[in-house]
Amino acid sequence: MAEVESTLLYEKLKSHIKGDIASRKLAPGDRIPAERLLADTHKVSRITVKKALSDLVSEGFLEHLPQRRGTYVRDRQRHADAPRFIAVAIDDVRNSFGAQILRGIEDFLWDRRIHTLICNADRDFAKVEEYFLSLRSHDIAGVIFAPVIDTGYREGNTRLVGILGSAQIPFTLVDRSIPRLLANYVGADHEESSRTLTRYLIERGHRRILLARGLECTSMDEREQGYRNAFEEAGIPVDERLVVSINDNLVDPEPGEDVLKRLKGLINRAGGFTCFYALNDGLLRAGVVALRSLGIDVPAKIQLASHNEIERPPLLLARTMPHCIEPTYEMGWEAARVLVEHINDPGRAIVQKILKSKFVPMEPEKPR
């Protein structure tokens, strides 16, 4: 009941301030009364005042001005007259992962009549670099960027965000972060979700689980760490031969001959195992092809598991496969929100937000 009452007070305060702005009692450029005075006047807590003001900044009614203390009424007409664009660079909007992130971004921005400029990054440093360099001559309010996955991940992506920094273009990272870089970031709980899935497999008797991972990036590294943490918690040492790595840029739409040859060699060297756990959909497809070309019957002899939601299930095996569903739409929506709040309030603290994935077991859990 107290929570409902608090929500009503917070919404009431927001409505009161909006009413003062609409009636011109508070004109564009006016400073809002201090938090303590607002709290005393409206008989609410300072926390309620802070939340109301923060929301009104996010919604574009109020703003913080550089080198000036306090919160001010935003000149919405002046800002509305200026074109506003957010640039987006993500892996590939053709697949479900990229499309859902983009949909979340666009839904948030369109409500505020902010437009998007899209770049299919194609996991290509040179393409994204050219795109970012071109933004310097456009009226870009900010950038949402999924760091490029390729060899030299940290160095290449650090160089790319350096272009944005030199042009003073605000940005927010989505899905993946950049090691040693403190920046606005919205991602999923890669380590925790992978640990949950691996723990599930261990509890069902699997002690030798082959893990197929791709190129270095923070999301891939965190998923591998979740796998290792689950084994450590179970008191089972990890056989390093069971952790295999291939270039997952070379498996879409189908794995090439060289990739399959390498993967088959790694599978043979791994020794016996009872489960093949792929850290993304492309690695799963490549794994099924490699296993079957080696004469290994899946899923009759080898259990399959995938960290990502199975977009194109190999021979419709998804029903027998535990996997995770990442909050892709929510990541896009939150990344847009974080970026817009940062644009409206450049002095705000860095935000790093982790969203929870959904674990889908191999079969529906039986009622207790």
Image (cartoon, helix red, strand yellow):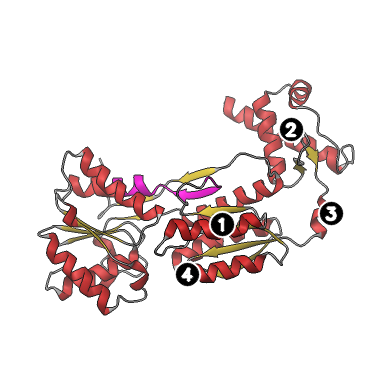
Nearest the viewer among 288 and 5 is 288
Magenta region: which residues?
Answer: 182-196
Q: Amino acid at mark 3?
A: Arg
Query: Is residue 144 highlighted in magenta?
Result: no
For marks 2 and 4, give the one nearer the viewer.
4
Q: Quadrant of the C terminus?
A: top left
Q: Are marks 3 and 1 in contact (CB under 8 Å)?
A: no
Q: Nearer the viewer, residue 353 or 261?
A: 261
Residue at x-position 73% and y-position 21%: 43
Of pointers 4 and 3, the one earlier in the residue sequence = 3
Measured Cα–Cα span from mark 1 to mark 4: 14 Å
Q: What is the three-letter code of the residue carrying label 1?
A: Val
Residue drawn at 51 percent across, 54 percent down: 174
Q: Residue at x 18, y 44 (%)?
A: 203
Q: Residue furthest left?
A: 272
The circle on residue 124 is 4
Mark nearest the camera among 3 and 2 is 3
Tell which circle, 1 or 2, labels the residue nearer the N-terminal end.
Answer: 2
Q: Which residue is mark 3?
A: 78
Helix, strand or loop at mark 2: helix
Q: Earlier in the sequence, mark 1 or mark 4?
A: 4
The percent position of residue 31, horizontal first and vertical second, equals: 83, 35
- Of labels 2 and 4, earlier in sequence is 2
Amino acid at pointer 4: Asp
Cα gap from disc 4 to disc 3, whole angstroms: 38 Å
